[in-house]
Amino acid sequence: MSIQKTNNILNLASLQERLDSTVFDYVDTTQNWGKAKESLQELLGQAVDYLTMYTKDNGGLPKSSPYWVLFMDFASRLVYFNALVDENLVDPQNDVAKVNIRQAYLTAANCLPNNHFDENAEFFNEIQKSYNSLNEAGTGQQIEKGIHSLNDCLNAFYQFTLTYKK
């Protein structure tokens, strides 16, 4: 089911509703990783397609606005929950998959807008905890809490869109 667009603008309220429903139903409640993956991948694909279309149609990344701050907040969550689901679906001995999942966690952190950081501190800590759980014992690598301007976040997600496979 596609997220609605009005005047070529993705409906973020609808995206939020579908994301919350998927996380509650298939991640938090039943841990039905297959269903979660199917739904989250569809939502992430739509977000990727939307930003790709926007950059193509407008010759670059969008300018800062409250809409794009919310979009990036959702994009961060979509990348994170897709990575979390992947982590629960892949063979724990698959080192290549673990590297890709760690990179997705890093992307999720880099997509989280700084101006929403106080509201998202708990979410950032969740990303960091998931990232750290995949580290080799004793490496001590952590995601640093950075100052991410909206442009940095958009650029991080745009770079992700270039390698995203549906």
Image (tube, rainbow, N blue to C red):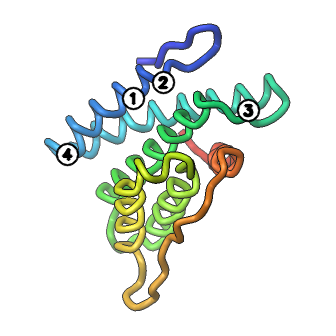
Disc 2 marks which residue? 12
Disc 2 to disc 1, how far (Cα)? 6 Å
Do the numbered discs 3 and 2 sit on residues whose CB atoms are within 8 Å? Answer: no
Residue 88's disc is none
Disc 3 to disc 4, how far (Cα)? 33 Å
| Residue type highlighted by circle 1 | Gln
Q: Nearer the viewer, mark 2 or mark 4?
A: 2
The front one of 89 and 155 is 155
| Residue type highlighted by circle 2 | Leu
| Residue type highlighted by circle 4 | Asp
User: Between disc 3 and disc 2, whose residue precedes?
Assistant: 2
- Count of marks, rendered view: 4
Which residue shows up at 45% across the image and 42% down it? 78
Disc 3 to disc 2, how far (Cα)? 16 Å
Report the quarter where the N terminus lies: top left
Which residue shows up at 37% across the image and 54% down it? 123
Image-based side of 121 in relation to 164, left or right: left
Do the numbered discs 2 and 1 sit on residues whose CB atoms are within 8 Å? Answer: yes
Disc 3 marks which residue? 62
Disc 3 to disc 1, how far (Cα)? 20 Å
Disc 4 marks which residue? 28
Do the numbered discs 4 and 1 sit on residues whose CB atoms are within 8 Å? Answer: no
Q: Which class describes the residues within 10 Å of circle 3: few (<14), some (14-19), or many (20+)?
A: some
